[in-house]
Image: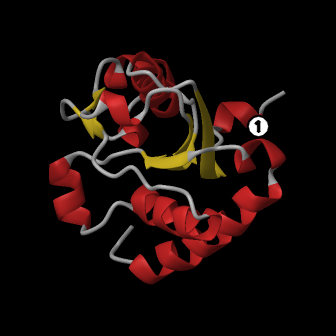
Amino acid sequence: FNGERELAEALGQLAGEAVLAEEELRGCQAVVAVPLAPARQAQRGFNQAAIFAEYIHKRLRLPHLRQVLIRRRETRPQMESAEEQRFDNVKGAFGVTRPASLRGLHLLLVDDIYTTGATVEECARALLRAGARSVSAFVLAIGVTRADWQG
C-alpha cells in the first residue's frame, strides 16, 4: 500500500519462486488474481495481487487470465470488518466474465493476505461455478488476529 509499487514488484518475484517450490502449485494451468474494487484500485494506483500474479505467470510461463474474475459489487475492506462479518461481506461479490476460458482448468488464485479465507473462498467458488476443474490459492502472507495468539 501507500504507493509502494516497487515493494509489490520485489515480492512478486519472490512469489514466483515460492510457487515453483510447491509441487501442487506447479500443476496449475493458469493464473488469476483476486480483483480489487475499481474505486479502491484507482485510489491505490495498483492491485498488488495482480502484480504478484503477473510475476508468477512470467516465472511459471502460464497464462495470466486478466479481467476474468471480477467484482460484481463494492465491499467494505475486509480489514475493516469483524472476522465473523467477512464471509457475509464478500458473499456473491465476485463473478466471471468468460466462463469458457476457465473450463476444465486447474487455476492458481493469487491474493496478498489470507486472514479468515473469506475472499479466497468466495473467489474460488465463483471460478468453480464458472467451470474451473479446481482452484489452488497462493497468498503472500497469512494474517493472524490477536485471538489466534491466546491459548
Q: Nearer the viewer, residue 146 or 134?
A: 134
Specify whether 86 is left or right of 39: right
Up-down relation of residue 123 to residue 144 (above or below): above
Quarter of the figure that contains the C terminus: top right
Specify whether 16 is left or right of 127: right
Q: Nearer the viewer, residue 62 or 45?
A: 62
Which residue lies under the disc numbered 1?
149
Helix or strand or loop: what does disc 1 sit on?
Answer: helix
Q: Nearer the viewer, residue 139 or 131?
A: 131
Up-down relation of residue 2 to residue 31 (above or below): below
The residue drawn where x is 37% and y is 37% is 101
Coordinates of residue 32 in the picture (x, y in percent): 45, 46
Is residue 110 something one can see in this rendering? no
The residue drawn where x is 17% and y is 50% is 38
Residue 102 lies in what quarter of the image?
A: top left
Quarter of the figure that contains the N terminus: bottom left
Coordinates of residue 55 in the picture (x, y in percent): 53, 69
Q: Residue placed farthest to the bottom in the image?
A: 6
Coordinates of residue 137 in the picture (x, y in percent): 61, 40
Query: Could you tell me the amino acid type at mark 1?
Result: Trp
The residue drawn where x is 56% and y is 24% is 133
How many residues crowd around disc 1 within 10 Å: few (fewer than 14), some, or many (20 or more)? few
Residue 79 lies in what quarter of the image?
A: top left
Coordinates of residue 45 in the picture (x, y in percent): 24, 69
The residue drawn where x is 31% and y is 41% is 68
Specify whether 33 is left or right of 59: left
Is residue 107 something one can see in this rendering? yes
| Image label count | 1
Up-down relation of residue 23 to residue 45 (above or below): above
